[in-house]
Image (tube, rainbow, N blue to C red):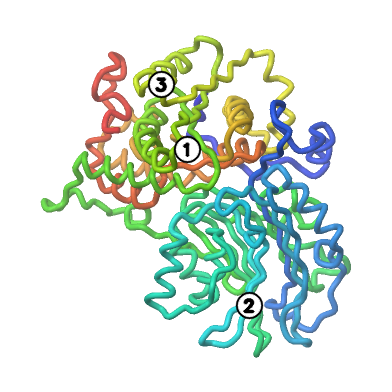
Amino acid sequence: IRLTQTTMLRVGSLVNKSQLQKLSRSVGAPCRSSASGNRREMCGLVAAIDDVWTPKSAGYSRDEVPILDNREALRQTTRILDHRGPDGYQISTGTVGAEDHHARWSMGHTRLAIVDPSNRFADMPFNLKFNTQDGEKIVHLAANGEIYNHETVYKNMVEKDGWDQNRISGSDCEVIAHAYAKYGGPKTAAMLDGMFAFVCFEEDVKTGKIKAFAARDPVGIKPLYYGRTKCSKSSDDAAAYVFSSELKALVGHADPSTVVAIPPGHYWTPEGGLVCYYNPEWLRNDDYAPWEDPDHSVTDDEIRQAFTKAVQKRMMADVDYGFFLSGGVDSCIVSHDLLPLYRKEREALGDDRPIPTFTVGMENSPDVMAAKGMVEALGGSKYISHNIRSFTPDEVFDLIPKIIYHMETYEAELIRSAIPNWLLAERAAQDVKMVLTGEGADELFAGYLYFQDAETPRQVQNELRRIYGMLGNINLHRTDRMTMAHGLEARVPFLDTEFTRLVMSVDPKRKMVDPEAVKTNSRGREKTLL
């Protein structure tokens, strides 16, 4: 089931409060695997802080805000996101700032432990005190995602910039707090390589100055929303900012008219609002055309090596993992690169278990048969434990309310394409906590049939840029919500920023789709370059 690229997540199709409450009652408890008693849930965050940055708010008496004043309300709100975690579950509250300019703050976090899973110091929110060259700072952090270069970031801080504050855990997300204290928010967001959404509150201990910062990864793999609390008396009353990984946790706290999804590659501050920090030339410059330079070339080997590096980067885990195998070219290429890397990794640990892979489809459908063929081509059951989740049309009707609850939209195409993803994630979560997927290849290699209508390479390039910018609202939204509903983390090597930069510098004439080749299923059809 393929989602059309003309469909975007529209505000008008979001579930409203009464509908969401009705769905919540019909769904009941957070989703559990029917074959496992263990809850495996993905990271989720909620956070709130008083507005002390708006001039009229400073010094005003503040309304009672349940998520700031009532730990039970914060706990219940955080538990709405139980399906995203917790291997660890924490809430934190407090006050920051000087007496005449202070702010209440709160954070809640549910954790799916994939890196350093047994260390309770790795549970968030992090509340860390740092001695910096600018004085003592306290940083409160809640984050969702994986930072693949966390060791490199911390090493460079120590060796190049003289950072002498020790880490308290092996958590990849802890490094965000260290970098924030050293470099500030914008520079921190730009240096992270991974999929992430995070919120930071900082207090300067000496001056009492307060900072708030939130950011989302360059592609929009991880979601983050924010809004303002309602003012009970008048619009002049001081309000608070509220953040969440999902809209459902903002219900009852935020004024719906103020709720905004932080766009991919953006950060937010109360002083400046939303600012784009991810500005690669290939995405922002309409005249970008390095292939016109005679000295510029991108070889097939360079593309292969860059992709292998992207796959290897996403193997960072201290728990079992596997991959989704749809039978399509994208996931087959992921499996082709992942398997030898996985076997080498396992051999070093003295572990010869096959890697789990997961396929969904109706019995003997073309996708299922193609996936079986790929498994055999990779060495069969000796190297791969292939799990197929077959389903019938009648089976899916009871799933629709649950899928809408987690997707937070009534968009028909998005819901339809989410159904097999739900079933696939449900099956995979019985065995693993993390999977690699083939998402994103279509947006880099012109993988949709309508590309045969492009008349020039420039049209192909511009359309790829356009649909890349929509990923966070469509394909990645679906992937995140359906895997998170079952406590499963999905990683997308095709959307590695360095790999994307390389592939988008390839002459787009190599991505042109020949209509005749499409008819004959021959070289020149969509994704021939891939």
Q: Secondary structure at mark 2?
A: strand
Is residue 122 positioned above or below 102 on the image?
A: above
Horizontal and vertical percent for residue 394?
A: 68, 13
Q: Amino acid at mark 1?
A: Leu
Disc nearer the start of the sequence (1/2)? 2
Pointer 3: residues within 10 angstroms few (<14), some, or many (20+)? many
Q: Is 454 on the left-hand or right-hand side of 69?
A: left
Q: Say if mark 1 contacts mark 2, CB within 8 Å.
A: no
Q: Find disc 3 in the rendering and name its residue.
A: 375
Disc nearer the start of the sequence (1/3)? 3
User: Which sits in the foreground, 70 or 169?
Assistant: 169
Q: Find disc 2 in the rendering and name its residue.
A: 129
User: Which sits in the foreground, 300 or 86?
Assistant: 86
Q: Find disc 1 in the rendering and name its residue.
A: 436
**Can residue 460 be seen from the camera position used here?**
yes
Disc nearer the start of the sequence (3/2)? 2
Q: Residue at x 61, y 85 (%)?
A: 136
Q: Is 253 on the left-hand or right-hand side of 291?
A: right
Q: Secondary structure at mark 3?
A: helix
